[in-house]
Every structure is written in structure tokens, then in C-alpha cells.
Image (spheres, rainbow, N blue to C red):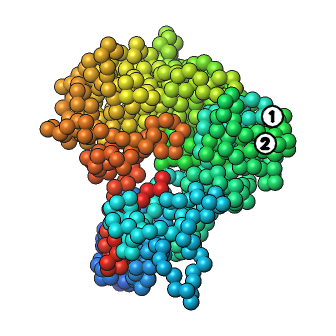
Amino acid sequence: MSYDARTLLDMLPAVYRVRDAEQGGALEALLTVIAEQLALMEEDLAQLYDDQFIETCADWVVPYIGDLVGYRQLHGVAPGVGSPRAEVADTLALRRSKGAAATLARLARDVTGWEAYVVEQFQRLSTTQYLNQPNVNAPAFVDLRRAELLERLGGPFEPQLRLAELRGPACRGGPANIPNITFYLWRLRAYSLASSPAAQVDGARFLFNPLGAPLPLFSAAVSKDDKALTLDARNVSQPLARRGLAAAKELFYGEDKSFFIAGVTLDQLMICDLSDAGTGWAHTPPTGKVAVDPVLGRIAFGTAPAAAPQVSFHYGAAADLGGGSYDRLKGFEPLTPIVVAPTQKPTIQAALDAVAGGGVAEIADNGRYSETPSLKVTATGARIELRAADKLRPMLSLGGEFAITGAGGTRASLNGLLVAGGRLHVPATASNLLAALSLRHCTLVPGLTLTAAGAPAQPLAPSLVVETGVVLEIDSCILGGLRVAPGAQVRVTNSIIDATAPNGVAFAGLDGVSAGGVLSISDSTVIGKVHASELREASNVIFFARHEAGDGWLAPVIADKRQAGCVRFSHLPPDARAPRPYRCQPAPGTDPSLVQPVFVSLRYGDPGYGQLSLRTPRAIREGAADGSEMGVFRQLFQPQRITNLRVRLGEYLRFGLEAGIVFVT
């Protein structure tokens, strides 16, 4: 029974209710407080019953129920990893199938958030067969006539048997041996880019990448039963191979599949090696056919189309970083009106002009916009945002400088854009009183400009020039070099600033040598030299920089005001002139040459761009403040994910077996 204040008051004799009403209702107020406490008690009593079940219990009860079934708590910081509540609920069911490969694969997916495939290496051993029961699916020799199978050798789905190796799983993740179990993990994700114009090389040759650079195509993982073992390459997101794709085009080609070219049917499609050969590409398809190279992302038409085709494809990346087709709603500015291009306005400039007094100019497709707009906030104190619609990535191909100006107290922001061919510029003019500029989830392509045909041309640096004392905020972006006036304040989080080489200039004043503005940076990777008037804060940052004789720099990282600021849990060049470091690498007394970051790739566009290689010393891969890796991918918590997996392996792996972990991507 529920007791509210009126119910309690009605239980009293009428004489007391009358007197209380005459004297101001003090008794009714007291009963109101008592009723509130009774309601809390009733709710608590009802929750006591719910707390007996993992599906309905309060969050604080989950660890206690887990203790009853012997559940061991894991790191709960990795995004996409199953909740402890779900793991506790599944514990008994998983233990009934303890040691099975399907169970181990499911555990690996649950505790790491990555796609996983488990191989029992004894099944890949070449053994003498019993003639009464021969295994015809266990070939002793490699079939050289099946080229698509040769591409899979050494990978998770290789079909070939091997001779036994007595080395443990610590060597190459677990070679073929009786007690070895290998866990194959895919760290990269496949991102979709739909209905984007292909970059044109000539009348018959195109590239999937709108930037006109090589780009490997990724497969889109098909749905599967989460309780089942991953069966084949269709269930994971990984680069498409030429031979494998040619053998199963129908599995990957289509409007709702891994890639598609508008107007091209499956019968017209050919899978070829379109590598450079002399002055052209290696193959020219017959009339009416279309050749695709998934490794280079190239398209060749046997019959030249009337215009550049619309393409849809998947590309690989480690995280939601830079301009990309992922969820960005949380970063949108709550402004009105919203003017949409190209539906309401034909060009980006027209959309910006329509909201000059404040509002949002939104791009509602993945198109390529060859224009050089300017953003000007005309109303004092107003805000303008130029953004791509959620889960879209349009490309802005500039023919010059993209100028950003504003009246007093104004703010401008860019969100979700891929910008190439020119630089952003905040000029120092008498009328430019812009107060703040924000870049979120944008890519200002490092070191690239474009020719009219869309092919890479001469390097262009820097990608952003700020000549005023504006407050510049950069979040989840990929940028080239920055040139910032000394009076500006720059805050960088979860981003890559890439001068394309360690001896390039990533951050400096307008002349590229003197001090830039005040810099605060966290969870980021900087490739190139840095010269700031003040390094107010640097946390979990990789400064990958070096200076050379005669370049005008005294050190690769310089902060003029060294008595202020803090550098913590970061990698600094040993000769950096920065504020006093705290728990940075290389540590005092350590050989600097032995503590250097090693990257999978430093070329923008590669799937592993900016990602730390496993050859990077552990002091960097686990050197952030929370035990994760330094740099831009700290928020992925990859060391914690691997720790989660090893904890579960100790609990679920059969006795006598040894596990090895292999990162496929």
C-alpha cells in the first residue's frame, strides 16, 4: 500500500485536521516529509526483490552477484565492450561450453569489442591419415591452380595444412602445434561512403577515393549469430584481396554490400591488378566491361562513361577521427535556422550567405564541392556552423584560401568536412573580430593539394593559418601544419597534427619558425616540430619531431615560457625545451633511441594511419595516465582490451593449451 501525505492526514481524527488547518498546516507539512520517506522505503523493499536477479538488479549489486558465480571484473573503459551485467548473466552458459573454440571466439569479441576468430592449430597440422577413414579435405600439398587460396596463406582463413612447429604461441602468435590456440583480432573498422563521385584521372580511369589517391577497399561484415564462431572472411571487416574478390564477386558487390559503382552490373565487373605499368595502368578492360582493383581502389572503363560515376564503398580506419561517415550528432551546435545544400541552396557559399547573421549551413550528401567559399559572421555575438549532415562526409576541394571572419564576439565552427586543395585562413584585418573558431571531426588533408583532374600534386603546408588572437578549438580532427599568431589560444584534443615528416613544422608562428600562440593539447599525436609561446598543458601526447642543423630551430619542441605549464605522460624528443615533464618518455637514464614510437603508417589515407605498431616500446603503448597508449588513439584503450582477453583466457582456456594473439589489422 502506498502512503502519501493526504492518506496519512485522513487517518487522523478530524479534530486534529481542523486544528492543523487553523494553525497553518504544520502537521500536514510534517506528514508530507514522513510520506516521502515511506515512499523511499517502499521503493527500497521492492528493489530488494529485483536485486535477486541479474537482469533487474541495481548496478551496484552486479559485482556481488558476479562473486557468487566466480565472475572476475574486467576493465570497463573500452567502448563497445559488453557490459558486466551481460557477462555475469552469460557466465554459467559460457562455462558449460568452456574450452570450445566457439566459446573462446565469443569471449574474445565480448571483452575486446573487436571481431575475433579462433583457430585450434592442431587442426592445421599435416598428419598421416588412416586409410580406412581418409580426410579428403586435408590436402598435403598446396594447389597452385587456385590462386584465391594462395592469397589466404599465413592468414586466419588459410586452408593449407602445415608441418608441426615446436615453438610456443609467443612466436608469431602461435604456429601450428598441438597445444597452440591462435586468436586473430581485427582492430580496424569499415566505414561506409555512399554515393560519392569518383575522382577522375582521364575519360576512362577513376579512383574510389575522392582525393584521387590510392585507397584499399574494405569488406562490410555481414550479420552473424553472436553465439557462433566466425566462419569466413565475410564476417569481418578487412581489406579486399584481388583473387578472393574475383572468386566471389556476388558476395561483395552491390548497392547494400561492400562496394558499388552506379550503372555497372555484376556481369560487367572485372577484378584486375591495375598497378602502374609504364605510362598507364597494367590492364585495359574490353569494351563494355569495368575493371576494379580493390587493393588500389582504381576503376577502369572499357567504354568511357559520359561523366564521373557515383561510387559507394567501405574504407578502413581505427577510430572515429577526422571527416568520416559516423555518428556526430553530439557535436552539433544547437543553432537555427538550418539551411541545407544542395537541396535548399545550390552551393556552399549560398548556404553560408543565407546564415550570415547566425545559424547552420548543412551539406546533405557525400558530394565533391569544387568551390572556394568564405565564411563571414556579420551579426555581433552570432554563431555560424558549417557542417556535414550526420554520418556523411562531403569533400570541399578548394581552389585557394577559405577565409573565416566575423564581427565582434562571434564564433564559427566546422564539423565533419574533408577539405583539400587549399588552406583555412583567419586573416588579420580591421573588420575581423572573430572571437572563436572550432574544428570538430574535420580533415584538412596533410601535405596534399589537388590538380584539376584530382591527382596528388605539390605539397601544401600549412593547412590552417590564424593571424588574430582568436580562441581555436580542435577536436577529433586530422590537420596539416598550423601557423598561429602569438596572441591566439589553441586547444587540441583527440587529434592528429601532421606536418608529413618529423622535421616538418607542425605548430609555429606565422613565419614557420617563431613562437605561435598558447597551446594546450591532450590525447593527440603531433608529427613535426612545435614552437609555442607557452605549452600550457600537454597530456598523453606523442611529439614525433626532430630538428636538423640549419633549419633555424634550437630544438624540435620549444615553449618560450618554460616556467609555466605542464607536460605529463607524453613522449618528448630528448632535446625538447618544454616545461618540466612528469612521467614522460624517454625516462631519465633511458637510451632515447630505444624508446621511440613506431607507426603502422604516416601516410594519410592508409587504414593504419597514425596507429602505433606493436614494435613500439611498451613504455609508449601503455604510457598514458590511465595505462592506455599515448597519442590520438588513447581513447580506444587497446592495452586494457588485451588485458581483458588474457584474464578471460586464464579462466576459460582448457588445461595444457597455450594462446597466442595476432592482430590482422
The amino acid type, in three-letter code, at marker 2 is Pro
Q: At which x and y percent is residue 450?
A: 62, 25
Residue at 73 percent of width and 40 percent of height: 283
Q: Nearer the viewer, residue 404 or 40?
A: 404
Q: Which residue is mark 1?
A: 307
Identify whether 50 is placed above or below 352.
Answer: below
Residue at 34 percent of width and 55 percent of height: 639
Identify whether 483 is placed above or below 324.
Answer: above
Q: Is residue 29 visible?
A: no
Q: At which x and y percent is residue 144?
A: 62, 60
The amino acid type, in three-letter code, at marker 1 is Ala
Residue at 34 percent of width and 68 percent of height: 166
Residue at 32 percent of width and 80 percent of height: 655
Return the residue found at the far top: 430
Q: Is residue 100 visible?
A: yes
Residue 484, quarter of the rendered image: top left
Which label number is shown at residue 515? none
